[in-house]
Image (tube, helix red, strand yellow):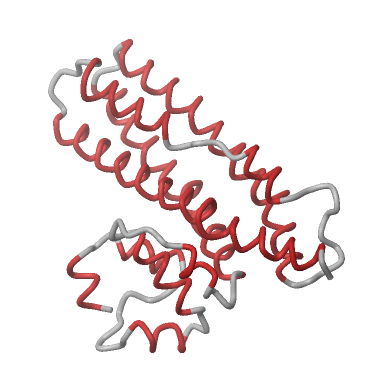
Amino acid sequence: MTALLKENPSLLLFLEHFEIDFCLGEITVNQICSKYNLDQTAFILIGNLYNDFYPNEQDVSAIKDPEILIRFLKNSHNYYKDDKYPEIKGYIGQLKTRQNSENIHLIEQFFNSYFNEVLEHLDYEDEVAFPYFYNLMKNNNEARKDFSAKEYLEHHTDIETKLDDLKNLLLNHIVLDKDLTIRRKFLQSLFEFEKDLRIHSVIEEKILLPVVTQLEGIKRNG
């Protein structure tokens, strides 16, 4: 695992979402999954997304413990709210302090409006979708009868698209004097945020939803 981290440092975030310590020594992927009681198929499928490899239906159907998908996604929600949002707001604040131009205020308004949409998306998942999925996985009769994977997919929004719009504003349209270091860090943070949001969406649509849809079919057919 350490060798994989050296090849792709973004896997540090992947491990953090699984609450896995980075000091791994010579431990293998198989040993990590055993130590942390993780479904190895799901662990590898998600890890591969950070290397831009996407799952196929056969791999998804091999997942034995889909509950870890929800755990991973909920931890990523905490990362967005408690880590990336304050970080990005901090860079905007630094730019405002040094320039305080109309362009900076435009960027701030755009990002605040965008992140309010992100919060709405995350709250919907945490309060409605994930409890339903979890109860379904537990074969719990408390699972809502007025909700389904299909309804979730129809409600699911592409929350990373507007982040790309903000990057385009900074790279193509809004001119800021000097402050290259802060702007670089700001953009790098946006790129990192966008990548993790994209992976988050793929996990939901290409891994979690097929599993949930299958479980719904089993429950319907007894």
Measuring from the top left, give residue 201's x and y in whole percent.
Answer: 48, 48
In this view of the protein, which residue sits in the foreground, 213 or 144? 213
- Up/down of 40 relative to 106, above or below: below
Residue pictured at 81% horizontal, 60% vertical = 143
Give x and y (percent) for residue 80: 47, 48
Residue 15 x %, y % = 39, 69
Left or right: 21, with 123 as reference point = left
Q: Residue at x 55, y 65 (%)?
A: 69
**Where does the N terminus fall, quadrant-wise?**
bottom left
Please tell me in which quadrant of the rendered image residue 139 appears.
bottom right
Q: From the image, which quarter does the C terminus lie in?
A: bottom right
**199 over 165 or under it: above or below:** below
- Residue at figure coordinates x 53%, y 51% from the top left: 205
What residue is rendered at 18% in x and 67% in y? 7
Q: Is residue 3 above or below residue 210?
A: below
Q: Position of residue 4 (x, y in %)?
A: 23, 73
- Number of disc labels: 0
Residue 37 higher or lower than 195, as above or below: below
Report whether 90 appears left or right of 212: left
Would you identify the image quadrant in which residue 138 lies?
Answer: bottom right
Kindly give the residue lying farthest to the top in the view shown.
Answer: 102
Residue nearer the viewer, 203 or 110 = 203
